[in-house]
Every structure is written in structure tokens, then in C-alpha cells.
Image (cartoon, helix red, strand yellow):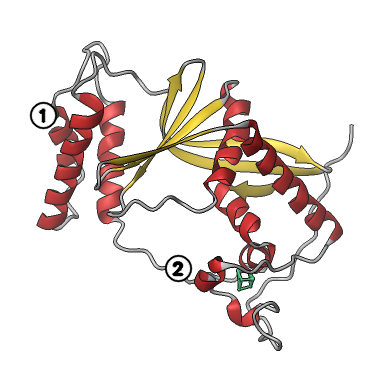
Amino acid sequence: MSYSLSATKLKTYGQCPKSYQFRYEHKLPSPTIFGSTKLGNALHAALANVYKDWNYAYPLPSLDWFAVCWQQHTSELTPTQVHEGWVALQLYYERYISSLPQIRKPLGIETKVRANLQVRNIEFTLSGRYDRLDYIDDGLELIDYKTSKSVNPPPSVDIQLGFYYLILEQIYKKALKRLSLIYLRSNEKLTYEVTPDHHQQAQSLIEDMAMKLRCDQEWKPVTGQHCDRCGYQKYCPAKNTRPEPLPQEAKEVTQVQLALGL
Ligand code: SF4
């Protein structure tokens, strides 16, 4: 059976292998705090409709088309959220649509992607999901819609870039050139260009992880500012001289199955 890996898992591993072990090997739930996701989900769904259902025989949708798509996803929102979402979509329309001569059909919208990678005789399945994928000058651009009010560049974005490079190259036979984060509620956009270092870094992390999985090596803690948000501090040997024992529900770490050589 292959070992499943996501960008989030790889980012956790890149930050601290010990917290990865707590979360994904021992399968201890991690307390995380999220705000309401209803507005975010509705905005994602409306933009998916905008691009999926548009008749590309016509050059450009009007703002009315955005309103039609938005109205399909507002039933569970409060009046304030409906207003905030519509303001965000109008800003998006003005910045990214209204000045175009023609809207281009994306290569993919809200798509799950998966690729296989064999490293040190371990079969990895890399899985991800993207909001939108566009063709640009002989390459690909990933679009990720963000619905937080503030613009916070995500930590470990380099690992995310490398991870998606590895998946998309296998599926589309094209190189990922850049990732753009579009902050819908503040009308900001952050763009990251992909360099050879990014996929090299992701590949190296996966190799490093493969070694630990194969040889049952120690998953060393790496301390830093990220420890402030870590839900496993009480079990962590780097944070306590006498860490608490793991709770009973902690799973035993199972040995991975090696792929057979040809
Ligand atoms: S407290 Fe810090 S070092 Fe310990 S597991 Fe969490 S992130 Fe890693």
C-alpha cells in the first residue's frame, strides 16, 4: 500500500518532524481554530460556477453573471455575510475580469489531483486539490482563493510550490511556473514564481521522510516560533524535561510496506 502525502503533511514535516509524527503517525488530533468557513465556502463555490458554467463562445461575462452565480450559494449565510461576499466578488470582477478582452477557460477548476512517486523503495501517493489552474506561456499557474480578511503569506509556501510542481508535472506534463494567492476580501494578490529549488526541496523532504519511515529513525523535534501554535507541547521532549506519556488513543507507528523492485 502506498504512503499518502499531502502538501499540508509535507509542510508539517518540513517544520518539525516530531509534530508530524504526533499528528500523522500516532494520529493524535490537533486542536486547530478556524473561524466560520461558510462565507469562504460560498465564495469558492460561486467562483467555481463563474468559470465552470460560463459559455466561452461569448468573450466576457457581465457583473450580472457573477450575481447569478453568487445567489446560488447564499442560502446559509447571514445578511452581513451575503453583503460582504458580494462586495468581494464585485472587487474581483473589477480587477480580474472587466478589463480583459476575453476570459480564458481554465485548465481545471476545483479539481483533486494525485500522482505517484517512488522514493527509496517506498511508494508515495501525493494528493492535492486546487481552486483553479490556468495555462500561461508554456506552463501552469495555480490560483488559490483566500477568504481571510487579512493578507497573511502562508508559512512554508516554498514546500507547497515544490509539492504541486511534482504532482502537476506528472499529470499535465507541463511545469508549474507560479502560484497566485488571491485574497478576495481585501482585493490583494500575492504571486510566487517557482524555481528549481522549490521542487528540489520538496523532493529532498520526501526522501528524508522515506528514510525515517524505512528505518524507524527518530523523528526529531525542531523548535521555533511554530511551537507556540503546536498542540503537542506537553508530549514534546524538546519542550519538557519530563514530557507527558502519549494518551491511550495514540496509534502505534506501523511499518511501511516497501515497493518491490523490478
Ligand atoms: S512543541 Fe515544537 S518542537 Fe515540540 S513537537 Fe511541537 S512544534 Fe515540534
Identity of the residue drawn at 30% across and 42% down: 188
Label 1 Cα crowd, 10 Å radius (few <14 / some 14-19 / many 20+): few
Residue at the far bottom: name it.
Answer: 242
- Where residue 134 sits in the image (x, y, percent)? 42, 25
Which residue is denoted by mark 2 in the rendering?
32
Q: Where is residue 112 in the image (x, y as percent from the top left)?
A: 49, 38
Please name whichever residue, 126 or 90, is drawn nearer the observer in this view of the structure.
Answer: 90
Q: Which of marks 2 and 1 is nearer the N terminus?
A: 2
- Which residue is rendered at x = 78% and y = 56% of the image? 213
The residue carrying mark 1 has its beta carbon less than 8 Å from ligand 1: no
Ligand 1 under 8 Å from disc 2 Cβ: no
User: Where does the image place residue 208, in percent across and percent down from the top left?
Assistant: 76, 51
Q: Residue 129 carries which label?
A: none
- Tag on residue 64? 1
Amino acid at the residue labelled 1:
Asp
Q: Nearer the viewer, residue 262 or 188?
A: 188
**Left or right, 229 with reference to 117:** left
| Residue shown at the point (62%, 38%) measured from the top left | 198
Which residue reaches farthest right? Answer: 262
Q: Are marks 2 and 1 in contact (CB under 8 Å)?
A: no
Query: How many other residues sit within 10 Å of disc 2, few (<14), some (14-19) or many (≥20)?
Result: few
Determine the secondary structure under disc 2. loop
Number of callouts in the render? 2
Q: In this view, does 11 lie above or below 17?
A: above
Q: In the rendered image of this protein, does residue 211 appear above or below residue 64? A: below
Residue 2 appears in view: no
Is 180 drawn above or below residue 247 in the view shown?
A: above
Residue depicted at 37% across the width and 64% down the height:
34
262 left or right of 151 in image: right
- Regarding ligand 1, which quadrant of the image does it lie in? bottom right
Q: Is residue 18 visible?
A: yes
Q: What residue type is labelled 2?
A: Thr
